[in-house]
Image: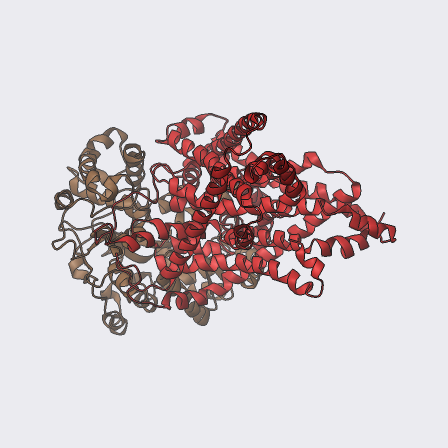
Amino acid sequence: MLRALTGLLLLALLGTAGRAATPDPADWDAVLAEARGQTVYFHAWAGDPQINAFIVWAGEQLQAQHGVTLQHVKIGDTAESVARILAERMAGNADRGSVDLLWVNGENFAALKANDLLYGPFAESLPNFPLVQAERFPEMREDFTIPVEGYESPWTRSRLVFYFDPDLLPEPPLSMTELLSWSQANPGLFTYPRPPDFLGSTFLKQALLELAAERAVLYESVDPAQFDAVTAPLWAYLDALHPTLLRGGRSFPGNGGELRRMLGDGEIALAFSFSPAEASAGILAGELPPTVRSFVPRGGSIGNVSFLAIPFNAPARAGALVAANYLLSPEAQARAYSPEVMGSTTVLSMDALSPADRARFEAIDPGPATLPPQALGDPLREPHPSWMEALEQAWLARYGVR
Amino acid sequence: MGCVEVLLRAAPWLVTVLLLAPVALGVGLTLLPAFGYLPVLGGDSVSLDPWRQLLAMPGLGRSVSLSLLAGVLTPLLALAIVLMFLAGSSGTALERWLRRLVAPLLAVPHAAAAFGLAFLIAPAGLLSRLVSPGLTGSERPPDLLIVNDPWGLSMMLALVLKEVPFLLLMALAALPQCEPGPRVLLARSLGYRPAVAWVLTVLPALYPLLRLPVYAVIAYASATVDVAMILGPTLPATLSVSVLQWFSDPDLNLRFQAAAGAVLQLGVTALAMLLWRLLEALAAVAGRHWLAAGQRSRGEAVLRHAGRLGVVFLLALALGSLLALLLNSVAGFWRFPDALPGNWTLQTWSRALPEVLAPLGNTLLLAGAATLIAVSLCLAVLEAEGRQGRRLAPALWLLYLPLLVPQIAFLFGLIVATEFLRWTPDARLVLFVHLLFVLPYVFLSLSEAWRHLDPRWTQLATTLGASPWRRFWRIRLPLLLGPCLSAAAVGLAVSVGQYLATQLPGAGRVPTLTTEAVALAAGGNRGIIAVWALLQAAVPMLGFAMALLVPRLLWRHRLGMRSTP
């Protein structure tokens, strides 16, 4: 509490300064000078103690190198913070916001950007931004098809990866069609998180990408007139799949963590995650049997980048810029890559790094159940965020009352 | 009249306003968007669209029925068990033993109890591991819908598990003034069997004193968020959980519908109370018939055994849940169907401990400050009441408003209000919101004992020339130290358990054991959940232990003082 109170005191003092000058990220020395002494309230999903420990470490580095205090505000769902920023906007709070830095992507970013709730553009002026080589990797400038336009800075890559228990499932199914025939032959060994859980909705999108007659429409805003026709194969597929799921499809796990627990308990044989290192981390943490292995579907799997955004009313903008830039540094990215730390896939392009920085990454063993980058192949692009909303609603309308 | 005197006189009104204004403001600011008014999101005219949107939600009818069912069935079961137990087991060794256990059971926060129960009864839980593969013949967890069952039975079980100790504590506090001894004795002399005698003579005097706690249980059970999220049905979820999801959906248009849902929740809770009122009337009629029939022993056996059975069953469930939490907190990889973990580790604890200090400090400071303020204000109200010689009856119900109005119906509105007032989200704001819930519970726990202190003590002091303040400090407070401390322990437990009331006003900047526990629970790691649930339960338990120990230490040379409950 004392820490929180001193933080607030600092905030009150700095709030007045922050109002006068909007930091210009192009003048990085001025940003560094302004950031010194600021407290950055970093809202980040806190369901994984490894991620939390990494943020503590990053805070120590920021304090030592730049005099910025990084305060992790632990949240269970990013939408809570979006709601908070909205409430502040509603009340006319334009410069004393409670969020300085936010881990965000997809529909949350879309909502923030569409409602003008973000500060920026800032991302492409960060000194470390060239290291992601955005010309070669367009996903750094596009969040679920929404142009980023510098309103958020890349932070980590996610990739949909399946993992399985070889004792119960010797030959993993490499496509949605194979998944269905396997599940029909072996009922009760698979399930997926209940949409609108992020991972559950991703499963729907992955299935739709594989089953839809054409993919192009998925990268544009949903046309309600076409929605039924485009998604018909998905619903036919789920109608066939659900009776074969665990609990007969009458109840679904709440999130990816619950799904992992079910695999650990031997309730299911196949699960999936947005982190390619999840299976390895689960084995290390004693949650999964050591025999678990990962794979990606034959036709590729959805991948996305998650970002760091700064709300329009963040009081410690300079500090937030410094934090975002630090989290993009080879030092921080390499540390996060290690499976004992976080197992996160880096957003940096190896070609853009100095040999010394590249060596940091090469020295790390990604873990027994983690696929090497070349095995992951190219990611499937995320559909337009309006599809996520529409799919979630249609799913709830169809399967929401059991 | 001194300044303090004036303050004391104003205390009841001050407290009422303190509790009433935020709730009214919060409900008001929920009502506006419920009818389409929320200019920031483009809602600038009054309309019924949010309601149309709400009514079109799939499964809304089921959600409402579930909330209503939980709101009526939970208090019914909990109250029945408590009353049958008191009727059948008054004065037995079991009752004396349970008196000591009731406090620690009450201390465990709802979310922690729900996780414990889930770890016990889930298909891959402790019970299932104990009987597998021996009885089930399977190496895999049974594919059964036990947790998150569509009718919310496991959720209601957890609620009953938590509400029975609460109602029991309230009943035990209120019982002495019903004079159960002489009443039962009289009825027995007329030939009634003991449990029947208790129901016919003590219950009618006891129930009016229990009514408020029961209504608080109805409000809680019909609108619970944390227990419902852990154990409740999911397709669809209860109304309160759905509303919370809409409130925190990135699609900001759902806010209107969420506000309408919050207002609907208010109606559902009110309807549950209305249904309960009907049940009360029915029970009164049935009771009169029973009385008039003059049966001396019918029902004796049922009363005697059912209550005891219920309590013993719940006790076993509570201990089993605690065991499940303990085992999971020290388990390494624990493959099903092993009854015990394959390897043991303190890693989960050792990793959690460095993270515990800051939230633990916040939890202790918040709970301590909220409890101290609440107890002081309650004492001021009760003292003022005593000196003015009358109960402030109309104000009394208002005092309990924060317990009777579901949290989601006013907390979001209240946060918007504090934003308008430009109050920075910080620990003071969290403290204030905690006070809204701590104060009524402290008052609930303290008022009966305070009001029914034998008046002859103070009369005696008056005749000896003691001033009102001297009577307060030297007579009433020492005599009622026990009840004051138990009320404080209840207040402490209430503060520790708050999630929404901490997260929203603090903007997440005031992490407590409960907010950390909820954030970490999102990751689904059983070991971590168990560690934090146990930590969450430890603080209130410490509070209750102190409430028992302090009077014993203080009055170790005064035998007569130790008998006060």
Residue sitting at the far bottom = A356
Colour chain A appears in: brown
Whether residue B175 can be seen here = yes
Residue at image point 38% right, 31% down: B62
Measured from the top left, where is residue B503 in percent x and y? 49, 50
**Quadrant of the drawing holding the N terminus of chain A:** bottom right
Nearer to me, A34 or B235: B235
Nearer to me, B121 or B488: B121
Measured from the top left, where is residue B166 in percent x and y? 54, 46
Q: In this view, does B63 lie to the left or right of B100?
A: left
The image's colour scheme reads by chain
**Quadrant of the drawing holding the C terminus of chain A:** top left
Whether residue A4 can be seen here = no
Measured from the top left, where is residue B75 in percent x and y? 50, 38
Q: In this view, does A359 lie above or below B235?
A: below
Q: Is residue B354 left or right of residue B194?
A: left
Q: Judging from the image, what is the letter of the chain drawn in red? A: B
Measured from the top left, where is residue A176 in percent x and y? 16, 44
Residue at image point 20% right, 65% down: A368
